[in-house]
Amino acid sequence: MKIKALLVMSGTEVQTVKIPGNFKFIRALVGKDVSKIKLARDIHIIANNNAPVSDFNRILKGKVILGSFLIIATKNNKIVSMDKKAIRRYTNMFKLRKHKNKIEFYREKYLEEYYTELQKTKQKNIEQVSEEVVKLAA
């Protein structure tokens, strides 16, 4: 049975897709290690837990969602098609233009912190090696 869902990929607009309604296919599409984020009573995001840290996609409640993800509907714990109202609502919520500036801000902030930490780690390693060389030379 095919269902209607929303596919949200980094750097692209939200797409309505028809996919098989089983988790095996969803895992193949999104990634093997998935997490489920509740958006509404019967609407969930299925995202990849192992998405690359540099693959910033969208912002949800101040948190960055990494990698491609699906928005699906459920009913009685079974995956079902999203109705037109839900498709319209979440397509609008995750429009690229609404998230692009925020994503760039978070990406720059993250990369700045990442490179600062990397520099600190390198400096510590250099200091440790220098101390060991001094001890060996003495």
Image (cartoon, rainbow, N blue to C red):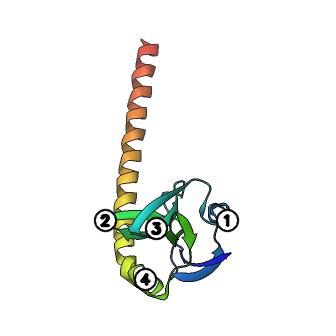
Q: How crowded is mark 2: few (under 14 residues within 10 Å), some or many (20 or more)?
A: few
Of circles 3 and 4, which is in front? 3
Q: In which quarter of the image is the C terminus?
A: top left
Q: Name the residue under label 3.
A: 44
The image shows residue 74, relative to residue 85, as above or below, that is: above
In the image, what residue occupies the spot 38% across and 77% down?
A: 99
Task: Inspect this view and state whether residue 5 appears.
Answer: yes
Q: Mark 4 points at which residue?
A: 95
Q: Which amino acid does label 3 sit on?
A: His
Instruction: Give the quadrant of residue 125.
Output: top left
Q: Distance between the residues labelled 3 and 1?
A: 16 Å
Q: How far apart are marks 2 and 3 (CA)?
A: 17 Å
Q: How crowded is mark 3: few (under 14 residues within 10 Å), some or many (20 or more)?
A: some
Q: What element carries label 4?
A: loop
Q: Are marks 2 and 3 in contact (CB under 8 Å)?
A: no
103 lies left or right of 55? left
Q: Which amino acid does label 2 sit on?
A: Gly
Q: Earlier in the sequence, mark 2 or mark 3?
A: 3
Q: Earlier in the sequence, mark 1 or mark 2?
A: 1
Q: Mark 2 points at which residue?
A: 62
Q: Position of residue 47 (x, y in %)?
A: 51, 62
Q: Name the residue under label 1.
A: 25
Q: Where is residue 131 in the image (x, y as percent from the top left)?
A: 39, 22
